[in-house]
Image: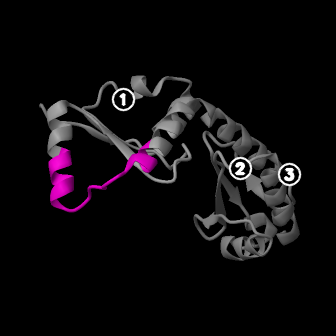
Amino acid sequence: HDVPVHVDGTRVFSAATALGVDAAALLSPVDSVAVCLSTGLGAPMGAVLAGSESFVASARRVQEMYGGGMQQAGMVAAAGVCALENRHRVHEDHENARRLAEDLDALPGVTAAEPDTNIVLADTRDADVTAAAFLAGCEEEGVLGTADGEYTVRFCTHRDIGGADIAAVVSAAGEVV
């Protein structure tokens, strides 16, 4: 029906890595995509909009009309290029997430399913600790996460999270439960 299809590609490289396909293969059937360069890729900020030449030109005009343009954005662009050039290492985030899930799952009362990507969901119901209380205890140890329900805690791994960080999360979680 000639309806253009746009994809919010915030986590497209993470999804492509988890599926074992190239991001271009996921995006080939769509007309446009916005890819966030900070979520999962490690740039401090920035996004890339891709689509037809006329679509991008129109989007640029709308962006400027609403004051969304940036002047002297070279430093941000350089960080974005670095993030895109290092997208091949996203699998490391997934491996760290699997390790974190396994280690959390081994704690008494905590259940963590094997993650598909770099997002780990842990259920604290059997430990009789709400997500809010669990996270408050973790925060006292310098570990941050988010509540994703009354008993579900969400942790994300990314390029700045390594083995020592995983151990710190598990240690803090162990103290809480």
Q: Is residue 82 visible?
A: yes
The answer to whether residue 27 is left or right of residue 131 is left
The answer to whether residue 41 is left or right of residue 48 is right
Q: Amino acid at mark 1?
A: Leu
Q: Which residues are magenta?
A: 59-77
Picture residue at 20% right of the left edge, 47% below the top: 60
List the residue tagged with mark 2: 161
Compute the Cα span from label 3 to label 2: 20 Å
List the residue tagged with mark 1: 27
Compute the Cα span from label 1 to label 2: 28 Å
The answer to whether residue 26 is left or right of residue 84 is left
The numbered mark, 3 or 2, whose residue comes first in the sequence reads 3
Residue 88: x and y in percent read 58, 29
List the residue tagged with mark 3: 106
Tell me the SS state at disc 2. loop
Picture residue at 63% right of the left edge, 33% below the top: 89
Whether the magenta-drawn stretch holds residue 64 is answered as yes
